[in-house]
Amino acid sequence: MNHFLKSNLRWLSLLGLALIIVILTFIFRPKSPDYQITANEALKLMKDQSMQVAIKDIAGKQLIDIRSAEFYLQGHPESAINIPIRQLLDKESVELFDNLLENGKEAILYGSDQLQATAPLFLLQQLGYKNLKQLKGGLTSYKEFKEPELASTEVSEVDTAFIRLKPEMNKVLVTKAVTKTRETVIPVRKAASSGGGC
Amino acid sequence: MEKKYTILAILLFVLALGLVILPKNENQKDVDPKVLLTSIAEKSRFLTVDMVTHRIIENDPTLLLIDLRPVGLFKEFTLPGAINIQPDSLFSIPNLELLTQPGKDVVLFSSSDLTAEKVWQLGTRNSISRLYIMKGGMNEWYNTIIIETQVGSTASSADLDLMSFRKAARQYFTGAGQTPEKTDKIKIPAKITVVRKAPSSTSGGGC
């Protein structure tokens, strides 16, 4: 055995070193966030309205402004911190979300309007951050300090009766709207004939 | 056989065994979350209602419209050529085949952007490419294309061109402008009836 080790010391050392590097790389690799639910399970989240938070319920929760820094600096709620959309999955942001999750604290994402924060929040929910919610109406509602007009569910504004007004329908309506005609009587006097006189 | 080859063979066998034992990654085909977030931030997934309308009028064969609204709204009215898919059944086999047709740009729309955004995200996560969203949804399309808006006197030539296009599109979808839009009563000339009156008798001037 000693003879074997002595004669193959070089390549055994290289092999051992390679194994150690692989193991250390695996252990200390940067952990990127991964999906905690499947796409099919995420379909059920689509209709979940509990992730919407009204303006009156934000007390005690961390506000997170997902707009770009320049918009954030133009004006924001006092306690809000800025994490632009592109930085939501950076190492520092993930650590913040993990800390909030571990401590049982909730955070509320908001953008300039409700739609801006919808997609990022939906992604973060799929990554397991159930403690993140969305401000109804976005920053607009915060500025106005009232309930937002934007519904959390979609409402159709299409007037189907109007768009069904096609040319054929127009002709029918025109026909029905014709008034009753008045008859005009024009007397035509026949030429008088002689009485047949003498 | 030399011992070193034996050791190497044992090592390879152990590694292979590890690959068998390790759990399978269920999300293997999923797009990386950071890549998905970049796509969300770029907003290149949005198409304006004018762009979509233009492609509808041109009968673009590469356009595939997917209406995500409830069935009731879909049956009342939808964009020409649109197919209705309920979000709950997004990953059913027929719907997946529909969404992954080669050479097609799949444009999703709902009443606004809420549902379309989430469906787009799940589809993109599932590695479905060429998915787009009609910005503003059906409400935006209706308020932009169907409802006539006035143009200010200081409008630029680009705005005027856009208004002309929308006017033409309105005519295409509703027929408005080709026949009277108003249903006012139309006057038809009075019917003339000739009534012959009996001539008054007059003397012939005779004796």
Image: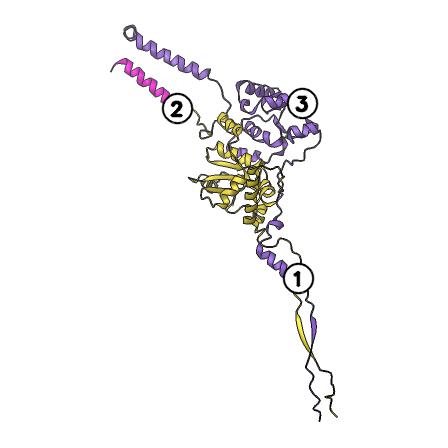
Tag 3: amino acid: Pro
Mark 3, residue position: A77
1 or 2: tag closer to the N-terminus: 2
Where does residue A18 sit, x and y in percent of width and height?
37, 13
Towards the viewer: B78 or A39:
B78
Q: How far apart are marks 3 and 1 (CA)?
A: 65 Å
- Assign a secondary structure to mark 3: loop
Q: What residue does disc 1 label?
A: B187
Residue A183 picture location, percent across and down: 69, 70
Gap between marks 3 and 2, in whole Å?
Answer: 51 Å
Residue shown at the point (67%, 59%) measured from the top left: B185
Name which residue lies at 44% across and 29% down: B28
C-alpha span from label 1 to label 2: 88 Å
Both labels 3 and 2 in a single chain: no
Contact between marks 3 and 2 (CB within 8 A): the answer is no
For mark 2, what is the residue?
B19
Q: Does residue B12 belong to the magenta stretch?
A: yes
Q: What's the residue type where badge 2 is placed? A: Leu
Report the magenta residues as a range.
B1-17
Give amino acid for label 1.
Lys
Taking the image as shown, residue A53 lies to the left or right of residue B202, namely left
Q: Which of marks 3 and 1 is in front?
A: 1
Residue A143 falls in which quadrant of the image? Answer: top right
| Label 1, residues with CA under 10 Å away: few <14, some 14-19, many ≥20 | few
Q: Which tint is chain A?
A: purple
Mark 3 vs mark 2, foreground winner is 3
Tag nearer the camera, 1 or 2? 1
Asked whether residue A168 appears in the rendered view, the answer is yes
Q: Is B165 located above or below residue A168 in the figure?
A: above
